[in-house]
Image (tube, rainbow, N blue to C red):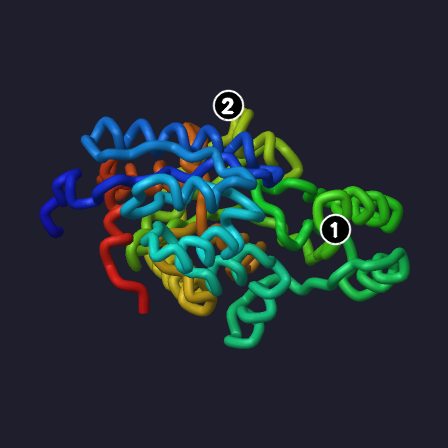
Amino acid sequence: MSQPLAPQAFGRVAVLYGGHSAEREVSLKSGAAVLAALQAAGVDAFAIDVGDDLLAQLCAERIDRAFIVLHGRGGEDGTVQGLLECAGIPYTGSGVLASALAMDKLRTKQIWHSVGLPTPRHATLSSAQDCEQAAQTLGFPLIVKPANEGSSIGMAKVDDLAALLTAWQAAREFDSQVLVEQWITGPEFTVAMLGGQVLPPIRLATNNAFYDYEAKYLSNETQYQIPCGLNAQKEAELRNLTAQACQALGVTGWGRADVMQDAEGRFWLLEVNTVPGMTDHSLVPMAAQAAGLDFSALVLQILAGTLQARG
């Protein structure tokens, strides 16, 4: 393992958090944790709550690099990444294209399908007729998702057509593009990637219908199993699948894939987050801890990626 860098090597670091997305509150918590860790490590870091004046702030401040802790649209979808590219400011995480692709669950699935990676069958919903067709083609239960949201916002499990129609209407409040996919019955895993290394998988268990917003950020009853309980062969398969999933999208720096396992033991890719949560309930810090990295070391390693030139 390489020697840790001196805090001065990073220069002045802007932590970008908040923003306008539906995940703003989570981003504020993540950003505060990252900022505190950087400052405690001696890094010259300050925070920017991203608003409409972000470009003016970037021009007014002397910024050597940016730590992006913006979740959801406007921060995780390639837009801020593109702005930073134009401003010549190095930033954490994936580039413009990978960020945009991973944020769009439909495009993500299409890419995985094209390279033969397993992901649940799906359909897009634009009308009541689409809902009826999806019910006939995919069967129940199903999971409805806004295609461009994170943190399980706007998601719902449905067991009949009436519930599907209601969930589609609710999801449209968050995104004009709504995705519905087959429900996979079985354990859910989340697998983090850091600097090209796949971290120990985590098995998730919740009493809710699925690992929703409440289970992710509010509940103290959600269970996180590390080690994940898989035998060595299946864990290696899961790690390799995560690496392939991230590589197919061009994800770099850090990220986290969500994966289901069915009753036959097969894995199914759900999505990849390119700016995962960094709160006290978040999964990447848990996985890093299991790999021997405390929160401070994790944050510094993510930031160290900004010192490398992009492809």
Residue 245 in percent (x, y) is at: 45, 64
Relative placement, left or right, of 126 versus 152 is right
* Residue identified by numbered label 2: 220
Which label belongs to residue 83? Answer: none
Q: Earlier in the sequence, mark 1 or mark 2?
A: 1
User: Which residue is located at x 55 percent, y 55 percent?
Assistant: 103
Q: Position of residue 208 (x, y in %)?
A: 63, 33
In the rendered structure, which amino acid carries the disc numbered 1? Pro
Residue at the spot x=50%, y=56% of the render? 78
121 shown above or below 178:
below
Query: Considering depth in this image, is 267 or 11 the residue closer to the camera?
Result: 11
State the residue at coordinates (41%, 36%): 278
Say the numbered circle drawn on residue 141: 1
The extreme top residue here reads 220
Q: Residue at x 25, y 46 (%)?
A: 301
Residue 140 lies in what quarter of the image? bottom right
